[in-house]
Image: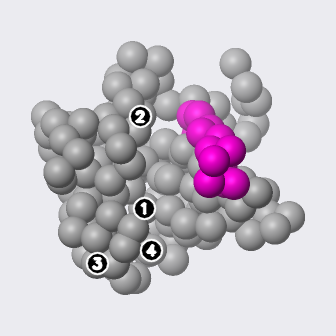
Amino acid sequence: MQGYNCIMVYDSSRQSLLFCKRMKDPYKGKYNLVGGKIEPGEDGFAAAYRELEEETGITRADVSLSHMMDFTYYNQDCWVEIYVGTLLEERELRAEKHPLLWLDLDEDFFDLERFAGEGNIGHMVEQVKVYGPGFAPATGPR
């Protein structure tokens, strides 16, 4: 199975969430979270920080990620790890392929015409609101 990650990054005020606007399929023209492939043998946190820096310029020094949840898609032979973090302070973004933008948290993240992921983005945002961001490597699962 191939591993992937999605990274939810909140701005320092926790009023906005970072998205990219997909320029190619899958989900061309829709808003999606940043993320990418987990390389064989790569630690999940290392992959999340690597993808985040590659796609946005945000580094470990800018944000502390927590592992919130995973999705396993047996019918697609893959899994997706979801990470959450809040910027310590505002910083300039550097887009790799897809334009980056901050969207307010009052958006309808379940809108399938605008957002990728078949409703999963809305689900993930609600999970963070209700249950928090997950666990950091030093704390382990709760």
Q: Which residue is mark 3?
A: 23
Q: Which residue is mark 1?
A: 34
What numbered label is drawn on residue 124?
A: 2
Label 4 – label 3 distance at C-alpha: 13 Å
Can residue 68 be found in the magenta stretch? Answer: yes
The mark closer to the camera, 4 or 3, is 3
Can residue 63 be found in the magenta stretch? Answer: no
Disc nearer the start of the sequence (4/1): 1
Disc nearer the start of the sequence (1/3): 3
Tag 2 and tag 1, C-beta contact below 8 Å: no
Asked if residue 39 lies left or right of residue 21, the reply is: right
Between 30 and 131, the one nearer to me in the picture: 30
Q: Which residue is mark 4?
A: 55
The mark closer to the camera, 1 or 3, is 3
- Principal SS element in the magenta part? strand
What's under tag 1, amino acid-wise?
Val
Question: Can you say which quadrant of the picture contains the C terminus?
Answer: top right
Which percent across, then down, holds residue 82? 55, 44
